[in-house]
Amino acid sequence: MGFNPDRVNIAPDENDSLLSIINGFEDNHWLMKTFKQFVFDNITLTALNAEERAKMVDSDYSKLIEAAKHLRLIEDKGKGSEIAEIVLYGIMRHHFGAISAVPKIFYKQNDHDNAKGADAVHIVLTKDDDFQLWLGEAKFYNGIEDNRLDEPIASVSQMLKTTILKKEVGVMTSLNELDQQIENQDLLKTIKDTLKFGMVSVDNLKKRIHVPILLLHECEITSGATELTEEYKNAIVEKHKDRATSYFKKQIKKLKTIPHYDWIQFHLILFPVPKKDDIVSWFLTRGKQLQEDANE
């Protein structure tokens, strides 16, 4: 979505975009059931690695139980972060047509060295038999006022450090995730050669890098709505345009000194929900039930 056509007070502004996503309503209520289904449809894909997924031929419930073993179910200050990571995975898969290069929930649970990097690492195959590297950040907030925007910007800054980028590339080339998901062997070789650990210059990667930043957020407009009306949609669009402008003004101010910042494409993704606590409570309860089933 173009959100700043006049380039007002933002420069450079050619490498940022806004994707605004909303859920629907039924019987005057936000479709919580649809949201829950979206989360659990994507848990097995982001919490299991490609080899595990290929081996499992059991029921969907069995896959959920196996995936639940890798959930951290954070209850402290960072609670809800896993939900955002799963939602971002689903958006990457369904909207951008991406394939997972590193299922981060799986490797974070397994104390992998690179858990401090991006929340999502994906490859998007392009129509010209080339590829893009998507490194994502995901947060779940009870609001997206200006004071909440500093944290995701700091995370993006950390993620784009040369040492962290090289670690991400090193993890990708040390796993067989892509071998299991890309049939075109010539393209697979191109990807591996481009990302070859220890030999790649980060400068050569930056024109391929896209950074999706998902802010799943509690929203008064959504909590007060009962139908998917044009009035509701327009209100969300205007709010998200305003938040995107503030976000990118802050990000550019803080990150513009990163070498070749303007080569990287940034995608702010805003997804409003009526009440964060209800979603987190449901996720923690359901996740613990699955983990208990896994231990029986």
Image (spheres, grey):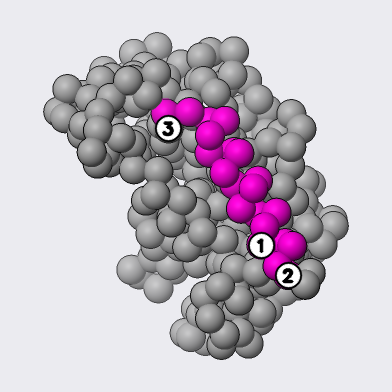
Task: Check the picture and name the quadrant holding the N terminus.
Answer: top left
Alpha-carbon distance for marks 1 and 2?
6 Å
Q: Position of residue 285 (x, y in %)?
A: 64, 48
Q: What amino acid is at disc 2? A: Ala
Q: Give the residue drawn at x 72%, y 74%.
A: 175
Mark 3 → mark 2, Cα distance in angstroms? 30 Å
Task: Name which residue type carries label 1.
Answer: Leu
Q: Position of residue 151 (x, y in %)?
A: 65, 25
- The chief SS type of the magenta part is helix
Stretch in magenta: 274-294
Characterize the local packing of mark 2: few (<14), some (14-19) or many (20 or more) Cα atoms within 10 angstroms.
some
- Select label 3 or label 2 by which is in front: 2
* Residue 121 image-quadrant placement: bottom right
Q: Which residue is mark 3?
A: 273
Pick whichever of labels 3 and 2 is earlier in the sequence: 3
Q: Which mark is residue 290?
A: 1
**Front residue of this view, candidates 296 and 157:** 296
Q: Is residue 152 above or below residue 62?
A: above
Considering the numbered disc 1 on the image, is that residue within a helix, a strand or a loop?
A: helix
Q: Which residue is mark 2?
A: 294
Q: Identify the residue at image location x=40%, y=73%.
A: 129
Q: Are marks 3 and 2 in contact (CB under 8 Å)?
A: no
SS at badge 3: strand
Which of these two is toward me, 296 or 70?
296
